[in-house]
Image: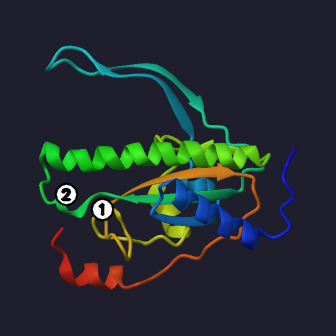
Amino acid sequence: VKAYVSDPKSAARDIKKVSMYFGASLVGICRLDNRWVYSHIYDGEGPSGAPGDTPVVMGDHEPQEIPEECKYVIVTAFPEDYNMMKYYPTWIAHSATSMGYSVMSITNMFLSAFIQSLGFKAIDCTTNDVANSVPLAMQAGLGELGRNGLLITPKYGPRVRLTQIFTDLPLEVDSPIEFGVVEFCNVCKKC
């Protein structure tokens, strides 16, 4: 049984609060734009073979099927620890990335279960194999595209991990933001 949702604005507010309670640092909502959904899913093993051999990928590619009623995307961001990222490209920095993925996975699992307990669909996109995260995060108002191809957020810069949940829960959507990233990148060009 679906919970009665009379006001998408208050539903969005509540989903954002719950997302942050479960571990997200930034939350935005947008309408699903199918341009960013991958056409196929891959179910199988990654490259295999001896070093120097041509990688062999085994598995099936099946068309991606998103239910038509899932029109909303909850996009969440998880920052990587600033001090740990100073050690890039070492294993110390990789631990910050791994922690981001771990928190992201737990948050999406809890948030998906919460939405489903309200009687709505929730497609957990933790593994980033459903859609391209950056354009959805831009549409959800979390940041702008940097010259480096990463989402730049006002609070954490580019050091975030992104994930989404697709849902049919009616939610008020956020607007894209501009805070000078494009202009800055046109001058800086260090990356």
- Residue that numbered label 1 is attached to: 159
Apparent side of residue 185 relative to residue 25 in the rendered image (left or right): left
Apparent side of residue 106 relative to residue 160 in the rendered image (left or right): right
Q: How crowded is mark 2: few (under 14 residues within 10 Å), some or many (20 or more)?
A: some
Report whether residue 112 is seen: yes
Mark carried by residue 85: 2
The secondary element bearing badge 2 is classed as helix
For this rendering, which residue is in front, 69 or 35? Answer: 69
Cα distance in 3D space between marks 2 and 1 = 8 Å
Q: Are marks 2 and 1 in contact (CB under 8 Å)?
A: yes
Image x and y of residue 80, in percent: 30, 57
Image x and y of residue 70, in percent: 72, 50
Image x and y of residue 101, in percent: 38, 45
- Kindly indicate the quadrant of the structure image that contains residue 122: top right
Where is the N terminus found, in terms of image quarters? top right
The residue depicted at 32 percent of the width and 85 percent of the height is 183
Q: Say above or below: 191 vs 164.
A: below
The residue depicted at 62 percent of the width and 57 percent of the height is 73
Report whether residue 38 is seen: no
Apparent side of residue 55 relative to residue 52 in the rendered image (left or right): right
Three-letter amino acid code at the position of disc 2: Met
For this rendering, which residue is in front, 7 or 71? Answer: 7
Q: Say above or below: 34 vs 11.
A: above
